[in-house]
Amino acid sequence: MVKSTKERALATNRRARYDYAIGETFEAGIALLGSEIKSAREGRMTIAEGYVYIKNGEAWLENAHIPHYPPAGIYGQHEPTRARKLLLKKKQLAHLQDQAHRDGQTIIPLKVYIKNRVAKLLIGVGKGKRQIDRRNTIKERDAKREIDRAIRQRMQ
């Protein structure tokens, strides 16, 4: 059977790149229950309030919300905001732990997607932006939008 490299985004954290200056990114697997992956594949997952922490040499995704999957019945359900284990290599875990203990660095979930029929989480190591940095981000985005608009009008 030929493996497909097609990726399908299930949830994105659009606010993360606005609130944080993202440096490195890593791809991690997520250990999900059956009802969780079925609910996530329907696109009902949110990671906006989620965060990643490392405890006892393991990475955990906390506060990501995956709602109940109604066809699973009342007994086959999961807790919507439970901690979910992230699957990373030991070198990646050590590097992430080293990065997370630096000044103001944190590990942020950026995107959940399906890759080769497996749920993956894109996490980034970032530093929180101050208010002035956020304003500059908005100004740069607006300036780029204006330039693109002018180029498109010029081409017509």
Image: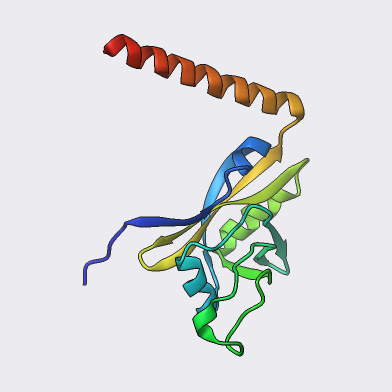
Image quadrant where residue 49 sits: bottom right
Image position of 133 (left or right of 12): right
Q: Position of residue 131 (x, y in %)?
A: 75, 28
Total marks in image: 0
Image position of 116 (left or right of 26): left
* Residue for point 61% across, 90% down: 75
Image quadrant where residue 128 sits: top right
Q: Position of residue 1 (x, y in %)?
A: 21, 72
Q: Is residue 82 above or below residue 89?
A: below
* Residue for point 36% across, 13% down: 151
Q: Which of the colour schemes (rainbow, by chain, secondary structure, one colour) is used?
A: rainbow
Q: Is residue 131 above or below residue 69?
A: above
Q: Position of residue 7 (x, y in %)?
A: 37, 56
Q: Is residue 3 above or below residue 104?
A: below
Q: Evaluate whether residue 134 shows in this view.
A: yes
Image position of 132 (left or right of 140): right
* Residue for point 71% across, 50% down: 100
Q: Is residue 153 above or below residue 103?
A: above
